[in-house]
Image: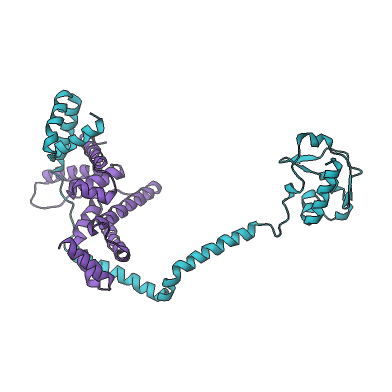
Amino acid sequence: MERDTLHQLLIDYAEGTIDPSLRSTIETELNKSAALRDELAVLQNTFAQLQHYEANDVPALYFTTLLPRIRERIESHSRWKRFFIPQWVEKFAAPATALCVLMFIAGLYTIFLPDDTRPAIYSVVRQSEPEEVEQLMIFDTPFGSTSNFSSTPIVVNDNIIMREFLMTSSMYDNVVNDTQILAQLDEQEIEQIVQQLDAALHY
Amino acid sequence: MNQADELKLIEDFKKGNEQAFNQLVLRYQEKIYWIVRRMIPDHDEADDVTQNVFIKAYHSLKSFKGDSSFYTWIYRIAINLSLNEIRRKKIRRAFSIEDEGTPQLHADDENPLERLEKKELNALIQEAINQLPEKQKKVFVLRYFEELPYEEISKILHTSVGGLKANYFHAVKKIGEYLKHGT
């Protein structure tokens, strides 16, 4: 017999509430197992000791004063609510809260979404193939010359970033790095750069 | 008062009869207080939780659909709020050194030594109950003190009768071991 089942029978047996049809089953098990008899002894001793347990004291008249105190708290809560929250507000509280949550989510979306749909910096150029990194060469674009470009392009997250090309662009003297320059380009300009890159790479 | 009377009181309360709610409080206040008090030994804290049980019942009764009996429903609230209070206390205790208090002796005609022994045993039993895991404590309180049938406890705690019996077995065994060894 499974241990859990034995425990269930044993507690019923110790309590004296065991189903008569199961009494002989547990008694047979008890005869067979000393460990089970020990467990029964623990349960019986515990029940015997628990009988000495006395209910804790309750202040006199506690139950006489309980209802008025509950009513007082209910009333004061209702008064407070009536004073601060008109009933019509309560009525619309749930839909208004739902609306606020939706507006909050929409606000977060607006904050964290870029101002326009311009692609993020690393998507300016398409994803590179490993061999392309070796193949990159000098080329010109309408926004600057890469004629003095000689170093290796950098690859970030598998995207080719033409750092030197952008750094040498004379049109953007007031900016200090490629990220800022790219941020100033619009979609069309970026597309043109991508095309230039494609052409340079013989696509 | 039978179940039909209770349902009538609940319906009356839903229609705005505040007296109907008072009747329900009067009917259940002692039972609820003692369930809470078995789980939270301090009277003041138990009193606070008992009041909260009825206040919660007051505000939630309008949504009571009668799928279970009222006493199953309110016992469940009592058990849940008691456990919440126990958890809050545990957290508070973790951040501060709280005086657990010592049993006070009362002067009356009983032999002081006997009274002390009885007090000590009472305190030890209470400690033994307090150290039970939450689930075993709920089952023990409802079964031993409230003497509820397993079928009723099953409705309150949403646990199978077999599971309840196993929990009760372990609870009684742990109390016995605590009383024997004090740990």
Quadrant into which the C terminus of chain B falls: top left
> Which quarter of the figure is the N terminus of chain B placed in?
bottom left
Looking at the image, the residue that sits furthest to the front is A203
Q: Quadrant of residue A109?
A: bottom right
Q: Is residue B86 above or below residue A24?
A: below
Coordinates of residue A80 in the picture (x, y in percent): 37, 72
Q: Position of residue B145 (x, y in %)?
A: 18, 48
The reply to whether residue A49 is in sight is yes
Figure colour of chain A? cyan
Residue most toward the right? A147
Q: Can the viewer see residue A68?
A: no
* In the rendered image, the vertical position of residue B23 relative to residue A140, given as above or below: below
Residue at 64 percent of width and 59 percent of height:
A111
Q: Colour of chain B?
A: purple
Q: Nearer the viewer, residue B62 or B92?
A: B62
Residue B132: name its quadrant. top left
